[in-house]
Each structure stands twice: as structure tokens, then as C-alpha cells.
Amino acid sequence: VQLQASGGGLVQAGGSLRLSCTASGDIYIINNMGWYRQAPGKQREFVAAIGRDGGRTYYAISVKGRFTISRDNAENTVYLQMDSLKPEDTAVYFCAAGLRIDSGYYYTQRAAYDAWGQGTLVTVSS
């Protein structure tokens, strides 16, 4: 499975961006999908996750109420709608896919993901 993320850019505080991540390859084995981010000098952190059918979503406390994750299985794409952006949201955003029906890990944990995209930079100016 290969993942291609796009949609990053420069935006002012309070603005919005929508990230997209399209999967290719053995897409039928994709279970959960998620977004992580890594700010300069910091560790990669969980942002949002979604289950296979899109019915279950999970968010980091820092983005809950501002970000929305969704997926279109027909298009093999997961989205991250980011509203009310803050300077502290500045980071490289990575999409990820879990390829196991039951990995034994919560979707908020990195170990639940087997494939990663290349990252897209989001910069929020104050």
C-alpha cells in the first residue's frame, strides 16, 4: 500500500485547510486510517483516526472540535478538514493506514499503522 498526502500550505490563524491522502496498491486490505503530525523539534503525535467504514472517529484533545476526519472508500482517500487553525498546528502532517483487521492496538497508537505517507507541510501564521 502506498499513500500520497496533499493539501498542505500556508494559512493565517483562524483559517482552514483540507488535507487529502490517497491510497494505491492493495487497498482492499486497508482497515483503519489516521493522521499524525510532527512539529520541528518534537515527536510525531496522533491527530485523528477513522475506522474502516467511517463510523468511528477519534481525535486528539488539541484538535477536537476544530478538525474533522472522513474517508471515501470508493476514492481510496482519507481527508482531514482543519478549521480554526492555530500557529501551534504548524507541522508536517502524515497520513497512515492500518492493514490488519485486529492489530491489537488502539487507532490512536502508532503501532496500529503499517503504511505511512510522505507528509505534507502545514504552516499557520499568527
Image: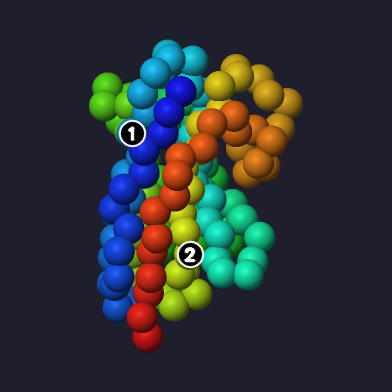
Residue named by callout 1: 22
Left of 88 or right of it: where is 22? left
As drawn, which residue projects farthest toward the right?
A: 104
Residue 10 in sight here: yes
Asked if 5 appears above or below 40 in the picture, the reply is above
Residue named by callout 2: 91
- Asked whether 81 or 41 is in front, the reply is 41
The dot on residue 107 is none
Q: Give, as a three-letter code, the residue at label 2.
A: Ala
Q: Residue at x 46, y 23 (%)?
A: 1
- Secondary structure of the residue carrying tag 2 is strand
Q: Position of residue 51 (x, y in %)?
A: 50, 31
Image quadrant of residue 41?
Answer: bottom right
How crowded pointer 1 is (Cα within 10 Å; few <14, some 14-19, many 20+) is rated as many
Q: Position of residue 102 (x, y in %)?
A: 66, 20
Q: Mark 1 or mark 2, which is nearer the start of the sequence?
A: 1
Q: Give, as a three-letter code, the residue at label 1.
A: Thr
The type of colouring in the image is rainbow
Q: Position of residue 109 (x, y in %)?
A: 67, 42
- Secondary structure of the residue carrying tag 1 is strand
As drawn, which residue projects farthest toward the bottom?
A: 126
Left of 51 or right of it: where is 21? left
Q: Residue at x 39, y 54 (%)?
A: 120
**Label 2, label 1: how many angstroms apart (C-alpha)?**
20 Å
How crowded pointer 2 is (Cα within 10 Å; few <14, some 14-19, many 20+) is rated as many
Residue 57 in sight here: no
> Which image quarter is the C terminus in?
bottom left
Asked if 119 appears above or below 126 in the picture, the reply is above
Asked if 94 appears above or below 31 in the picture, the reply is below
Q: Residue at x 54, y 45 (%)?
A: 58
